[in-house]
Image: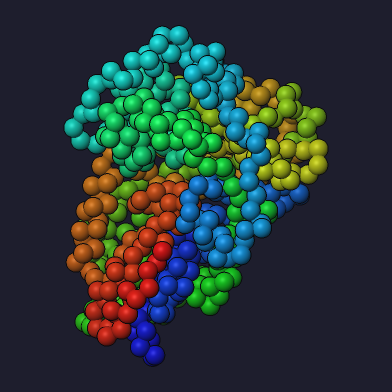
Amino acid sequence: MTGDGRPRVAIVGGGIAGLSLAHTLLKSVDVDVVVFERSPRAGGNIRTEVRDGYTCEWGPNGFLDSSPPTLDLVRELGLGDRLQVGDDSARRRYIVRGLRLHEVPTGPVSLLRSGLLSWPAKARLAWEPFAASRPAGDETIHAFAARRIGGEAADMLIDPMVSGVFGGDAHALSLRACFPAMWQMETDHGGLVRALVARRKRSRDKANGIGAPTGRLTSFAGGLDVLVRTLADRLGHVVRTSAGVEAVVRTGTGAYRLLCEDGRTEVADAVVMAGGSAQTARIVRDFDRPLAAVLDEMPTASMVVACLGFSESQLPRPLDGFGYLIPRIEGLRTLGCVWDSIVFPGRAPKGHVLMRVMMGGASDPTAVTLDDDRVLAVVRKDLRTILGIDSAPSFVRLIRHRTGIPQYTVGHRDRVATAEARLARHPGLFLAGNAYRGVSINACIADARNFGIARLQNLRGSEAAPALGARPLI
């Protein structure tokens, strides 16, 4: 409780989840908020570097513009005129098969003409309405896809998509946790074809019909860093960088004491743990060991990102799309490549291109330990194989994420439920961030917007607590 009687909310973690939650609380409720961020800068893995005329993203390179909470936040920050929508050519995407690029089919005709799947695999797709029913219990993404559309399509279409989104292994990740909408489609309609037919009926009079993307990839002129820097600047003194939290303990009054790494002690009526699950487990371990144990069961996938610049004259073929993904059965070590300066023009000097090659993930955890020369050698070998690029890049920036993308493996929803049950024992302690309910920027922002003021009404020892419900978050 602050001197003026307002409840105090501490947010541990200054990534997009923590920053957007702080922004939402301050505009919606009469509370005092402080954000503790261990690193010298806020923003987490959203970080943009401009070097030698190349605009390099450390983590995600954009968000889909179909999420209202994200667009609302952009408008509130006055960033609408700085949005940069991905170029139309980026709708063209490729998957590697037989060490060649094959454009991802966008409809039945292009699927029939595509060399991405064999004719038996294409025929198997037609049997999707008659696929076996869902088995009991949680199901992996690959098992779901193989059951509904066949093993070859699962390997060639679904496996690389999972690598691209999660850096994950489709044989280990939970369908319901990772793609709840797809799980719901089967639940509601009994199959994917039936679900798509129902969707066509609903969208018959709309421009975006069946097969249309759910949004356009969007960023900002200057990179995604614009979003987190603007948020941090707007929050001002609310955000404390180089301010790690070592532990959280409960006081006799029901408040929480945060033990900071610099030796200071802070007190808050509520604490939102908005960092990674491993970081949160370390902080709460002495306070609630069963909670820490379940958080320890939530893995992440490390990743190496190679930002490479080439002169257009070095390329055997023009880059004409978003990039490509590589199924694991192709036997290459890199996961795929995004043609960043094609997706977002202006991110490379004139006459040059910028591409980002991803390597590592759940299926290749040792990649992050390779030295720079070895990483570059692997990346160049795969680029030579797929694109025929023999020349050395004129620009190189290697980025390592040792604690990378959360992996929602089978049983993830049960683990989150177990963690929430433990939190029910500690009124005023909450979990937020991409480790639990969605890994994307949109998911983190939506989670913050939907956090629910009612969840903060149980602050003990606070006469002002009922006032927290006076104004809705959304």
Measuring from the top left, give residue 240's x and y in whole percent. 50, 73
Q: Is residue 450 left or right of residue 349?
A: left
Which residue is pictured at 37% across the width and 60% down the height? 450
Q: Nearer the viewer, residue 3 or 79?
A: 79
Question: What colouring method underlies this structural image?
Answer: rainbow
Which residue is pictured at 21% across the width and 61% down the height? 422
Residue 13 at least partly seen: no
Q: Is residue 278 above or below residue 163?
A: below
Measuring from the top left, give residue 327's x and y in whole percent. 48, 25
Q: Nearer the viewer, residue 72 or 12?
A: 72
Measuring from the top left, give residue 415's x and y in whole percent. 25, 49
Residue furthest top as drawn: 119
Q: Quadrant of the C terminus?
A: bottom left
Q: Quadrant of the N terminus?
A: bottom left
Q: Nearer the viewer, residue 201 or 332?
A: 201
Q: Is residue 341 left or right of residue 295?
A: right
Which residue is pictured at 62% across the width and 61% down the height? 79
Residue 199 at least partly seen: yes
Q: Nearer the viewer, residue 88 or 134?
A: 88
Which residue is pictured at 80% across the width and 29% down the height? 313
Q: Is residue 104 left or right of residue 13?
A: right
Q: Is residue 410 above or below residue 3?
A: above
